[in-house]
Image: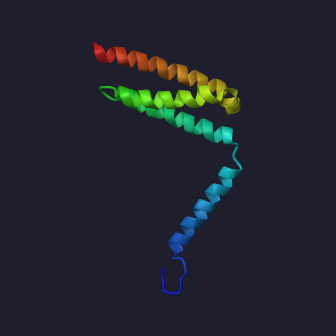
Amino acid sequence: MSQDNTIPDDAAETLEAVAEVRRRLSQTPASVVVANHAMGLFELAAIHLSDEPPRLAEARLAIDSFALLVEGLGERIGEHHDTLVAALANIRLVFVERSQGSRD
């Protein structure tokens, strides 16, 4: 920052970008944002399950967090509910399969 208290160009651009993201986010239904974050937890679990050996404790935490959102919010998630329920069932199945495989 210069002595005249102006914001450097790169900082001003960053602030503008953040403000634009906030504007767009405020126009997005919360159900879409929540569903997106839930799928991030699904992906996190899948990553840990695909490791060799699978990182089961890490995957379990991600799956449990995913389940809390999906089962806890239920139909409030909106149009994404059925997809998220199916994804939860699938990742739980993969967890069981990888858990059994890691014991062999």
Q: Would residue 9 be seen by someone viewing this image from the given angle? A: yes
* Residue drawn at the location 49% of the way across and 86% of the way down: 3
Percent position (x, y) of residue 19? 62, 61
Whether residue 90 is situated above or below residue 20 in the rendered picture = above
* Image vertical order of residue 100 relative to residue 11, above or below: above
Q: Quadrant of the C terminus?
A: top left
Residue at 36% in and 26% down: 56
Direction from residue 36 to residue 58 in the image, left or right: left
Residue 73 at x, y percent in the picture: 64, 30
Asked which quadrant contains residue 55, the reply is top left
The relative height of residue 46 versus residue 8 in the rendered view (above or below) is above
**Residue 22 on image: x %, y %:** 64, 56
Q: Looking at the image, what colour scheme do you see?
A: rainbow
Nearer to the camera, 28 or 68: 68
The count of marks equals 0
At 55% from the left and 24% from the top, the residue drawn is: 87
Report whether 22 appears left or right of 10.
right
Pinpoint residue 46: horizontal percent, then vertical percent: 44, 29
At a point 58% along the width and 31% down the height, the residue shown is 69
